[in-house]
Image: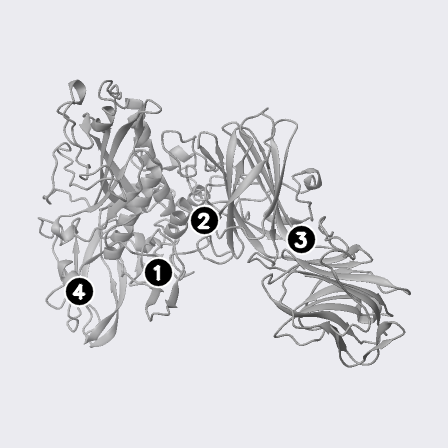
Amino acid sequence: MIAGLAFLILGFPNDPTATRHASDAVPLIDQMRPVSRISRDGFTLQYWTQVPCETQVEIRRGDLPRVAYGHKPDGTATIKKGNPLKTSWHRIELHDLEPGKRYFYRLWDPGAVPTATETAWGAGEGWRREFAVSTQAQKGWKTIVRIPVKVLLMPNVVNVESAYVDPEVPAPPPAKLTKEEIDKIKSEYAVSARELWVSSGMRLWIDYQIVVDDRLQRWGPEPAMAQDTYKGLPVCRSYPGKDFEAPGGGTWTFVDMKDPMRVVTTPFVEERPYSGQIEQAFPRKWNQRTKKWDFYNSGGGTFGVDGFPQGIPGRSQFLGGGDTAWLATHEFHHDLESHGEFSLSNREDDRIVFDHPTPRRRVIHSDGSVEEVTWTTNGRHGEHWDLIAYWDRLITDAQWLRMYFGYTETVRDADEDGFPDDDPRLPLDEKRFGTLKNKKQTDGHTGDLAKAMLSNWIPGPLQSTWIKPPFQSVRPDPATPDADGDGLLDVDDPYPLFPNAPFISVLSPKIDGDPEEWKNVPEAGSFSRGGIRFVFKQAHDEFGYYGLYEVHGPWSRIDGTFDGEGEGVYSGKGVLGFQTLSNATAPGAASPAGPLVETRPSFGGAPGLKIGAKRTADDGMTIEFRLPNRGEGPWYWTRGGQEIGVAINVWDRENRGYSLWEPYHLFYARMLEPYGREELPSNPPPRLVVGPGVQVIKPGDASLKLEGGWRVEDGAWRHTGDESPLYLANLKVTDFDLAAIVEAKSDVILGGFTKANKLNAAEGYIGFVGGYSNTVTRLRIFGNERGDSNLVMTPGRHEVQLTRRGGELWLLVDGKPAVYATDPNPKAVLDRLGLLGGYGGDQKVYEIRIKV
């Protein structure tokens, strides 16, 4: 969470001409933004002024912003003049600059009156506020931006009060965190820095500078009975005055890197100002039930860099019981969003995207209030890590080099492939990755930087650092042109890290947990980690989307998220999700009395979900599910071509999480087209027979309305002439069974109609047998035909039944299922049920049965 101004965002909409993830071998282009070109010896500015004026830019080479607290601007400012004519649209090319250096600039705009914020950031005397650009490096080098971040760890913090829950037997003091445990925390920050580094195309180095205050400290008041180790402990600087202060659990101070144990609560001057800091305390509370010390868990809190001119850096704070790598990334990214606000032009296409996603919208409420999200923060991405990776990779190289904060550096890049060669300070370089520093394409096909960026470098699903399994993202093989071995070169492969084809097979399985019918369907993904073996398969037909989980080992929960519209999991469109929880507690245990699994909704839930499970002989479990095409669910498609994005995490009994594919990254697969008639589902409704709740109507019954060519003749309703209805009116039904004993040459048509529908075969819910001159049998739902059968009318009497129940539609002929479809609107209320005659069918109806 962020608690201050830090709502920035990136290059959206996407400009395909802009340079992303490149080296410094050629100039960087970004034609739709204020800095449209950056080269080794200059850059180009384009801008609009309030009133026509001369084109003038104040420029100085330096390291420190003019607003750095306690400092005067370094370097000498000069005025560069462009077009002497007065104009409102300006473009100026600045040349003869030094490679790999930062230049601060202000634009001449004398007609604009700066706001208070703009004044605080350097505007005045006709000049706009100050911005910055870093030039490209000399040949064989690359310009990057290093943002140093102060990180204070306080690993040994104790809730002393909790130790005296039983005053007679105080809890034993916790052991201090070991060097290995502190190194584990430091490695979490390294994971964070590497993800941000790679996602920026290796332009932005978040340099976490970690100091440790390993003193034993107190969280909360000291009880009167405290003694020995517990007595006289200094209070932790992050303690907020109560046990927990949302969102990050504690409070903020100012960290002095020269004396980190000194608690500072007011701004101070630093020789090299920092624009970001993180405070992470690790308070522990005694658990009287388990007799253990438990770490406090928390979210995070962040203030942006708004107060930088007043000596206040961006500040993040969180506690130590959660996922440190994620909290560091998420919370500092909020600070980075604020860095973007004051570095870029702070408009929708020139920002660093706020990492709490929501789609663009404008809603006018009934009370007259208006809810707006004018800048979208939703894209084609998954949760958490994946959304940061997605948006940061859309930022252009020129935008990264416009960072106003941190420090500009150049790093060796001998082959000019954009991937630094050998610099152990950096989060990743060619030496550690395994690519060659003198060859741009180590594998012979894919650029080395692009190769590294095939992975999102995400460690795993969100979980406590203290139980987290090893790193889970795939590390690409730098020397192999086909990293996943599927026969496709990485440059051509839509999923170069996974050998699974991104297609959804055509299949109509029974939802009973039996995997036999899936044996010819290829895997969509699989893993074997932490004692869990997991396989996922997917299929579809006209009736639904199907999934199969095969899972072995100590699993407890499977989280499945499904994007049915391809717009990302936060789009609010067609996003479904559900958790599958195991009711089988241990391998070898007897099956539970109830179902093997239960489900819980997530995201948009899973309306219309059907699920079945079976134990396997080797103590595993197979789980099948179906999400409907139309019917109760929001998804709809015809034949094939629809994309479904899937993210799956599997959790063990210790709450450790394992991802299928890369963590949170959606695997989008496309539905293949069917051939031939599809199999019907295995759960048709029963034949409607005379019995309780069934209304039987015979010729002459006054409750039935006859129109047009219908008449009673020889014990039957008989039809001649044009289309006309035989129906029961004044109903109010959703689910129903409608059956008729009929004889006809063709076109036996049963239907149900809403109040808005006309009584004809093009409207409402229609089932017809022997249509189109007695050649085909289908359902027609609000004019759209579904299903297909080669049944036709034959001489003699037949029983035709139309059933609408539970989001499904069935057409039965002589008690046997003929056609099936999902109901596009199961809540639609019908007011008429009946038959239609016509089309030369010479229909005779001997009996009608209805159950509602």
Q: Are marks 3 and 1 in contact (CB under 8 Å)?
A: no
Circle 3 packing at 10 Å, graded few (<14), some (14-19), many (20+), is many
Disc 2 versus disc 1: nearer the observer:
2
Identified at 11% across, 49% down, the residue is 69
Instruction: Give the number of the mark in front: 4 or 2.
Output: 2
Tell me the CA gap for discs 4 and 1.
22 Å
Instruction: Kindly state the secondary structure of the residue where label 4 is placed.
Output: loop
Of label 3 and label 1, which has the lower sequence position? 1
* Discs 4/3, front: 3
Q: Residues within 10 Å of mark 2 (few under 14, many from 20)?
A: many
The answer to whether one can see residue 416 in this image is no
Q: Quadrant location of residue 95?
A: bottom left
The residue that mark 2 highlights is 382
Proximity of marks 4 and 2: CB atoms separated by less than 8 Å: no
Which badge, 3 or 2, comes first in the chain's sequence? 2
Q: Nearer the viewer, mark 3 or mark 2?
A: 3
- Label pair 2/1, CB-CB below 8 angstroms: no
Q: Which mark is residue 128?
A: 4
From the viewer's perspective, tell me whether residue 796 is left or right of residue 283.
right
* Mark 1 crowd level (few <14, some 14–19, many ≥20, 10 Å Cα): many
Which residue does the numbered mark 1 point to in the structure image?
30
Q: Position of residue 78 (x, y in %)?
A: 13, 60
The x and y percentages for residue 811 are 75, 60
